[in-house]
Image (cartoon, helix red, strand yellow):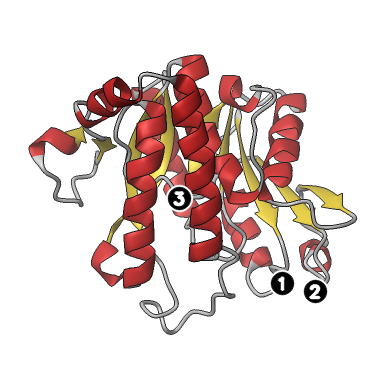
Amino acid sequence: MKLDRHNTAVVIPALNERLRIREVVESALHEVDSVIVIDDGSDDGTADCLQGLPITLLRHATRMGKGASLRDGFAEALRQGKAAVVTMDGDGQHLASDVPRLIAAANRHPHCLINGARLRRREQQPLYRRIGNDFGDWGISWGCGFRIRDTQSGQRLYRAAACALRDIPGEDFVFEAQMLISCARQLGYRVVSVPIEARYKNVHGDQAFRRSHFRPLRDLWRITSHVVRQVWQHGDVITQYRLTRANPPRIDDADGRLQTAPEEASA
């Protein structure tokens, strides 16, 4: 099925996003017909900021984590009959204007998970985040059996088959890592990265971003320990690692704004 703005929903997990959430949702409504926001037990009036907008708002009475929010958002999108979901964070780090690019890439790569990889202006990403991302890419790629760029990105396009996967282990940010692995192993998907801009407070000083919920030491440890268990349980650890290194990342840079090594570029 060809994807478009009518059969694709944007799902936005939100925890204390009062600062930017209305702006994020309004921009998403320009790109798709359906926006689903999951308020994960916010206590700053996040839901109040969305009054009057034509969206689906799901609310958790207490904080359940990003994994639970994404599961609920996926289920609602499937209930609405959507063919795909684009996930976005609620803090303004992601641009809704990239959503059509993800949809177009999904139509070019119908059996892939589309990942919005923060490769543009990456040199301006905080060093500790860049190191953490590179480490995460190395480990999660091993779990998938092929290399991926920016495995920690929260802006992705999942087709309905991916959203319908059940019993995905892991919570919070671990869930997103596991989705890559589960899509690769259970659905046979590859991951195609579409370059998006890395947007951070130290780069975009005129824009306000709340402090990230991602805690590098804590969350990278959780992700790493989880992925190590997955790799070990899968077996053939050395063979799997060699297979991973032999399969370079796939990058769809259709507009040619990113300079990539020939072995990493595909369109």
Q: Secondary structure at mark 2?
A: loop
Q: CA distance from mark 3 to mark 2?
A: 25 Å
* Nearer the camera: disc 1 or disc 3: 3
Is residue 47 shown above or below 250? below
Kindly indicate whether the residue at mark 3 contacts the one at mark 1 (C-beta within 8 angstroms).
no
Q: In this orientation, which residue lies closer to the viewer: 9 or 213?
A: 213
Q: Position of residue 101 (x, y in %)?
A: 39, 41
User: Which residue shows up at 45% across the image and 50% down it?
Assistant: 152
Q: Which residue is mark 2?
A: 44
Amino acid on which disc 2 is placed:
Asp
Kindly identify the residue that appears in the image at 58 percent across and 50 percent down: 173
The first of marks 1 and 3 along the sequence is: 1
- SS label for mark 1: loop
Whole-percent x, y for residue 232 in the image: 45, 28
Q: Would you place residue 216 above or below residue 255 in this image?
A: below
The residues bearing labels 1 and 3 have C-alpha atoms spaced at a distance of 21 Å
Label 3: few (<14), some (14–19) or many (≥20) C-alpha neighbours in 10 Å = many
Badge 2 crowding class, 10 Å Cα cut-off, few under 14, some 14 to 19, many 20 or more, is few
Residue 74 left/right relative to 162:
right
Side (left or right) of 178 relative to 101:
right
The furthest residue to the left: 262
Q: Residue beneath label 1, please?
A: 18
| Image quadrant where residue 82 sits | top right
Q: Quadrant of residue 165?
A: top right
The reply to whether dot 2 and dot 1 touch (C-beta < 8 Å) is yes
Viewer-closest of 35 and 11: 11
Judge the density around disc 1: few (<14), some (14-19), many (≥20) Cα neighbours within 10 Å: many
Task: Give the label on residue 153, or none.
Answer: 3
Under mark 3, the amino acid is Ser
Callout 1 amino acid: Arg
Q: Sequence order check: which comes first, mark 2 or mark 1?
A: 1
Q: Secondary structure at mark 3?
A: loop
